[in-house]
Amino acid sequence: MLAAIEATRHGAGSVLLLDRSLIGRGGATVMAQMTVAAAVGPGDHWQYHLADTLAAGRGLCDPELAALLCRVGAECILEMDDWKVGWARQGNGFAQVQAPGHDRARCVYVDFLSTGPAVSRTLRTQLQRQGEGIRRLGEILVTDLVVQNGTVTGAVALNVATGQPITIAAPATIIATGGLTRLYARNSASANMSGDGYALAARAGARLIDMEFVQFFPIGHLAPRLIGMDPIMWDPFRYKLGGRLLNGAMQEFVERWGGDAEDGTYSTTRDLATYAITKEVEAGRGSPNGGAWLSFTHVPEATLRAAFGPVIDRLAANGIDLTRDCIEVSPIAHYHMGGIRVDPRMRTDLPGLLAAGEAVGGANGANRLSGNAITEALAFGRIAGAEAARIAALPAPAFNPAAAAPALALLSSTASMRNIAALVARLQHLMAQHVGPFRTAAGLNQASTALAALAAELGTAPPGTPGIPHDLNRQDWLDLRQMLLVAEAVIIGAIARTESRGAHQREDFPALSPAWERNLLLRLPAGATHLELA
Ligand SMILES: Cc1cc2nc3c(=O)[nH]c(=O)nc-3n(C[C@H](O)[C@H](O)[C@H](O)COP(=O)(O)OP(=O)(O)OC[C@H]3O[C@@H](n4cnc5c(N)ncnc54)[C@H](O)[C@@H]3O)c2cc1C
């Protein structure tokens, strides 16, 4: 949304904003309920934010992208304030909290339920203010890019509402499709996060970077069932109130797996907490649903309410009383550090193709700091939009409909009916089992073999007949086609990186290796069906 606004502000006369869902309501942004990191407090500077971002990235951040995230991100946060997003205030400035890995209180928020929704709403309002310049189309699932002599000239998409294929000609295309968390059985995002953007870019011939770095959030909500709440909401609870992480026998356990005694505080980093929970469950000491207990029962009600008033009410509506009830948590796929390789102007390897947001790889290296993702989405969206407007003003190759023919043929083809949702579930369990936060060569190779079997079952054409509105089975087929390519990218990277660094932990190579302080690039050679290291 910000890319579209910025393109218009930089003179692009005709901007088309597409989303497979409803505009501004289908991705991770609208689901984020917590905080956004930006150096906008007194005494803070974007370079301090950058230093923390680089340290968290464990040597793999693209320093230019990371600097843009921190510098332009802070400008965007101030502009969002001008646009009345409603950042919480304290005294004369913003209220800011300190999230793990930041050297100071740097994270702004609206409140602990409304940050992402407020960001999305503000951008939707600004989109409307741009008037006719930005055409918005929801329920358009982009399935392939159109490439002519190495230049991206548009895209092919399925109109989900009619079942009809469409072709879009564009002198500049920005991929802002978010992350890949749907690859995993337990994930914090929406069903739209199939990693489509990575697959679209790779199929067109652009390189991907550091695809092995999937961030798992250790204390994702597991049970009891929560409605209308962010599954990663326990993080602010823990950094404000501590809370006890307990095994099935109600004992603290992180010390057993290399952590320091927490004693009700929140001192264990995300990677170590993920390790400790996973290992405790493997040892048969998990909570009933296969995770750990999180307990705030020692925190007085008044303290809970003072810190999280509206959240406490929302929990009560879900039948949870934290003064009495423990909840179950376990690691959950949450964010992707890898993605499409771009330069500081958000240009990919291919003329005419840009990327923004979580679709971009490299800014956060091997591990992303809490609060950096929305900042990244805003900063990179702003830069990509301005650059796309500049590119659109240059002479471009005329759109050749013949270049779109293979992608259109795929959407028009038919095959016998199969239950594709079952194949998606198989992929998700495979990824969770072998390509989760802890990996081994044996497990990764098993995943690779199973992936090939899934690809064979997928076949070459979507099931059913074209032209049926909201044909979910056909959509699942199109999604799974992209998910298999993206899963392959994660697995190839994870097999190649024979070390443990940040979010990528190899149990057979437990140490960080200085020789591996380098990025891993992948590409899909023209005409090939498998990715290779670039
Ligand atoms: C539950 C949750 C909580 C989070 N909390 C925080 C937080 O507190 N702070 C923080 O900084 N970050 C947080 N994050 C991460 C952050 O929200 C995301 O990284 C960020 O919002 C990504 O923004 P984006 O614009 O790149 O993509 P998104 O907001 O995910 O948008 C991508 C859009 O692309 C569309 N799309 C995808 N594929 C296609 C296709 N093939 N065709 C057409 N459209 C497509 C989707 O429908 C979606 O609308 C959280 C994430 C989750 C899931």
Image (cartoon, rainbow, N blue to C red):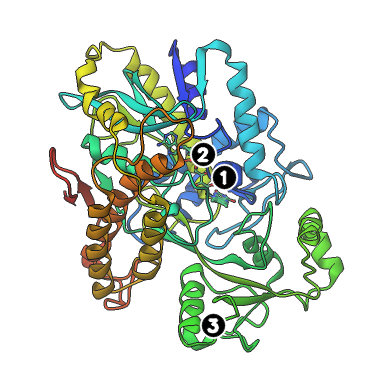
Residue flagged by tag 2: what amino acid is it?
Answer: Gly
Q: In which quadrant of the rendered view does residue 223 lie?
A: bottom right
- Tell me residue 293's x, y (percent): 63, 77
Q: Is mark 2 within 8 Å of ligand 1?
A: no
Mark 2 or mark 3, which has the lower sequence index? 2
Residue 338 falls left or right of residue 205: right
* Pointer 2 with pointer 1, Cβ within 8 A: yes
Where 23 sits versus 183, above or below? above
Kindly tell me whether residue 340 is visible in this rendering.
no
- Identify which residue, 299 or 472, lies in the foreground: 472
- Tell me residue 121's x, y (percent): 65, 32
**Residue 38, disc:** 1
Residue depicted at x 59% and y 85%: 261
* Pointer 1 with pointer 3, Cβ within 8 A: no
Q: In which quadrant of the rendered view does residue 82 lie?
A: top right
Density class for disc 1 (Cα within 10 Å; few <14, some 14-19, many ≥20) is many
Kindly tell me whether residue 16 is visible in this rendering.
yes
Q: Secondary structure at mark 2?
A: helix
Rounded to the nearest angstrom, the CA distance separating label 2 from label 1 is: 6 Å
Name the residue tied to disc 2: 73
Density class for disc 3 (Cα within 10 Å; few <14, some 14-19, many ≥20) is many
Name the residue tied to disc 3: 254
Where 190 sits versus 197, above or below? below
Rounded to the nearest angstrom, the CA distance separating label 2 from label 3 is: 35 Å
Residue 79 falls left or right of residue 395: right
- Identify which residue, 227 or 475, lies in the foreground: 475
Mark 2 or mark 1, which has the lower sequence index? 1
Q: Secondary structure at mark 3?
A: helix
Residue flagged by tag 1: what amino acid is it?
Answer: Ala
Q: Secondary structure at mark 1?
A: loop
- Identify which residue, 229 or 217, lies in the foreground: 229
